[in-house]
Image (tube, helix red, strand yellow):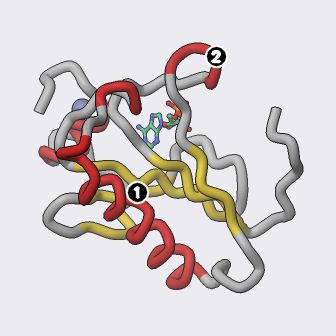
Amino acid sequence: MTADCLFCKMVSGQIKPSTVYEDMDVLAFKDINPQAPVHVLVIPKKHIATLNDLDASHAGLTGKLIIAAAHIARESGIAESGYRIVMNCNADAGQSVFHVHLHLLGGRVMRWPPG
Ligand code: AMP
Ligand code: ZN
């Protein structure tokens, strides 16, 4: 828990997100500014600022984020039509919240390459 981190406040319950999935290690909630009909953020409960802070000890946890996203995609009915998972790291990618998170986007056709 990092006191001034928005997503840590969601994990602690200080701020109540629109939760769609939770387990021991992972929390998932609707993005407040959705970029697709389904736009869910999947985060580790543990504070990790960016992808650059990951090491081998986080292998299981990062796998859990993707497995949770695939589960939520199935539950949201977009598994067959398709979806995209995005993780932004630092300024050039537009990371705005410095607690690692995965974006699950679906329910519309995605363009490639991304902007
Ligand atoms: P990123 O730009 O990859 O760091 O993504 C951060 C995401 O957090 C953005 O898509 C925001 O819309 C989203 N976000 C910011 N504040 C909140 C909030 N209070 N509840 C849900 N999502 C949020
Ligand atoms: Zn945090």
Task: Report helix, strand or loop for mark 2.
Answer: helix
**Residue wearing tag 1:** 29
Decide: is 44 above or below 65. Answer: above
Q: Is residue 52 left or right of residue 69?
A: left
Decide: is 57 above or below 52. Answer: below
For image coordinates 47% across by 74% down, the residue present is 72
Find out if the beta carbon at label 1 lies less than 8 Å from the nearest ligand 1 atom: yes
Q: Which mark is residue 92?
A: 2
Outermost residue, top side: 91
Tell me the kind of residue under disc 1: Phe
For image coordinates 41% across by 70% down, the residue present is 67
Say whether marks 1 and 2 touch (CB < 8 Å): no
Q: Position of residue 36 (x, y in %)?
A: 72, 55
Residue 52 versus residue 50: which sits nearer the camera? Answer: 52
Which quarter of the rendering shows the N terminus?
Answer: top left
Tell me the kind of residue under disc 2: Asp
For image coordinates 13% across by 44% down, the residue present is 12
* Marks 1 and 2, how far apart at CA: 25 Å
Decide: is 108 above or below 56. Answer: below
For image coordinates 82% across by 32% down, the residue present is 115
Q: Position of residue 80 (x, y in %)?
A: 71, 85
Quadrant of residue 63 within the rendered picture: bottom left
